[in-house]
């Protein structure tokens, strides 16, 4: 049984509004081949990849049992493969647990999303709601987010300029990331003048439709040290589900995220996250969530994250860098977002983030979320030590 698990290789496609030249299987094969080349690993050989975890969704892939086409691509023919649906950070968590349990030594984790091939994401997320009570009123992830945004912003008297500042920062960071989708910087004025979609959310407050894939290889401690000179260790991990019914939750807060963070911090031995972490990558599908998630992670005081962002505290070279990759608001598929956050932590910790590299990164946090108004949250802390 291994005491520690590390990420030893990572690859991601460029995220795009529409990958018309690739089927989702081809996106997956692109990143799987890259991580295999980085490590020299193969399938079905002693000491090589002995497990696969995939992340996909039947609705987005337009097929029942969406991982069925993945078996051959991830070396799972006559071997183990498990699928996680929704956020891919949970797939990384699942891969880690398999190694910690002693069942596997080296695990391939891959996530993909091709949102461009569906007519509307809202039609898909609408199906996530209870058919008897919630679906009939037209709820989907977007309208649920608007309800949460109104509850949170009203409670703390937060103005639209503060949420817009999060979009501006993310798009500015994305301009330095060659893999990011939306690389054009925007201003607060442009965010506020963008088209209203679902009050109080405007077009630039909402993550764009995106296609892309990410792959990682996880390994137990001794194999990790053999496979790379720069393993990125999973120091802590935690996850938590909140109530399914929106009416049972305090939408101006996130109890699930607070608990997930507490579990990850406890496992990592972190007492003061703002001082002990060097950066955070947040899965914020809507601008207000950047503020709310920061507060629930214990990185900002309740109601004060917006002011901190607007004053530059979370800029690339600010007090505490957030979303150096550009984040989900710069374009990641819903399913892939959490794993894309972990991918950026991997690059930053290895000093491979290029023009957006933060100096002296030793510990970084990745966050993933899924479900209406952030029903489920996952938090991981990574370290090079």
Image (cartoon, rainbow, N blue to C red):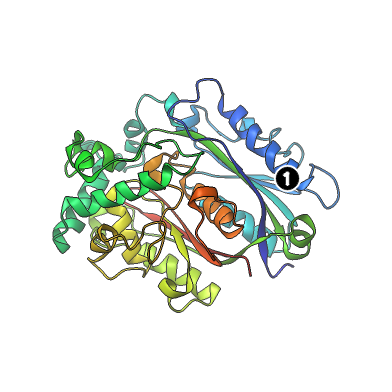
- The answer to whether residue 253 is visible is yes
Q: Is residue 81 left or right of residue 173?
A: right
Q: Nearer the viewer, residue 50 or 324?
A: 324
76 up-or-down from 302: above or below: above
Judge by depth and name the residue closer to the eye, 24 or 168.
Answer: 168
On the image, the x and y values in percent for residue 373 come to 31, 51
The residue drawn where x is 32% and y is 55% is 290
Q: Position of residue 289 (x, y in %)?
A: 31, 53
Residue at the disc numbered 1: 38
**Secondary structure beneath disc 1?**
helix
Q: Is residue 59 left or right of residue 10?
A: left
User: Quadrant location of residue 11?
Assistant: top right
Find the residue positioned furthest to the top: 21
Number of marks = 1
- Give residue 231's position: percent from left, percent from top: 68, 60
Q: Quadrant of residue 134?
A: top left
Quarter of the image where one finds residue 133: top left
Q: Is residue 180 above or below residue 312?
A: above
The image quadrant where one finds the N terminus is bottom right
Q: Compare residues 68 and 154 and report the one nearer the observer.
A: 154
* Other-residue count near label 1 (Cα within 10 Å), few / some / many at <14 / 14–19 / ≥20: some
Residue 376 versus residue 109 in the image, above or below: below
Residue lying at 75% horizontally and 36% vertically, measured from the top left: 77
Residue occupying image coordinates x 13% and y 61%: 157
**Residue 215 picture location, percent across and down:** 61, 43
Q: Is residue 88 in view from this perspective?
A: no
Q: Quadrant of the C terminus?
A: bottom right
Horizontal arrangement in the rendering, residue 256 relative to residue 222 (left or right): left
């Amino acid at each position: 049984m291994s005491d520690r698990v590390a990420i030893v290789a990572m690859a991601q496609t460029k995220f795009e509004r529409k990958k018309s030249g690739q089927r989702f299987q081809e996106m997956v094969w692109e990143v799987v081949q890259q991580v295999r080349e980085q490590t020299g690993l193969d399938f079905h050989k002693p000491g090589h990849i002995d497990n696969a975890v995939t992340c996909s969704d039947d609705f987005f892939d337009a097929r029942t049992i969406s991982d069925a086409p993945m078996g051959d691509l991830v070396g799972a023919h006559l071997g183990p493969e498990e699928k996680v649906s929704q956020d891919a950070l949970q797939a990384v968590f699942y891969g880690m647990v398999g190694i910690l349990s002693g069942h596997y030594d080296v695990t391939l984790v891959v996530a993909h999303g091709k949102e461009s091939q569906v007519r509307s994401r809202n039609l898909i997320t609408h199906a996530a709601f209870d058919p008897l009570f919630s679906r009939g009123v037209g709820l989907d992830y977007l309208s649920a987010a608007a309800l949460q945004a109104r509850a949170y912003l009203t409670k703390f008297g937060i103005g639209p300029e503060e949420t817009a500042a999060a979009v501006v920062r993310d798009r500015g960071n994305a301009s330095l990331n060659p893999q990011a989708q939306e690389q054009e910087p925007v201003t607060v004025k442009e965010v506020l003048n963008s088209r209203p979609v679902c009050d109080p959310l405007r077009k630039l407050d909402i993550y764009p439709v995106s296609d892309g894939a990410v792959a990682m290889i996880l390994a137990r401690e001794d194999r990790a040290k053999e496979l790379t000179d720069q393993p990125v260790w999973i120091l802590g991990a935690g996850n938590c589900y909140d109530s399914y019914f929106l009416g049972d939750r305090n939408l101006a807060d996130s109890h699930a995220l607070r608990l997930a963070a507490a579990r990850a911090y406890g496992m990592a031995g972190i007492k003061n996250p703002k001082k002990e972490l060097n950066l955070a990558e947040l899965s914020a599908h809507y601008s207000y969530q950047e503020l709310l998630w920061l507060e629930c992670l214990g990185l900002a005081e309740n109601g004060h994250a917006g002011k901190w962002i607007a004053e530059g505290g979370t800029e690339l070279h600010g007090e505490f860098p957030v979303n150096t990759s550009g984040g989900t608001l710069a374009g990641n598929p819903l399913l892939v977002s959490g794993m894309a956050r972990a991918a950026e932590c991997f690059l930053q910790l290895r000093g491979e983030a290029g023009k957006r590299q933060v100096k002296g990164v030793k510990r970084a946090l990745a966050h993933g979320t899924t479900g209406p108004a952030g029903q489920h949250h996952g938090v991981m802390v990574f370290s090079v030590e």
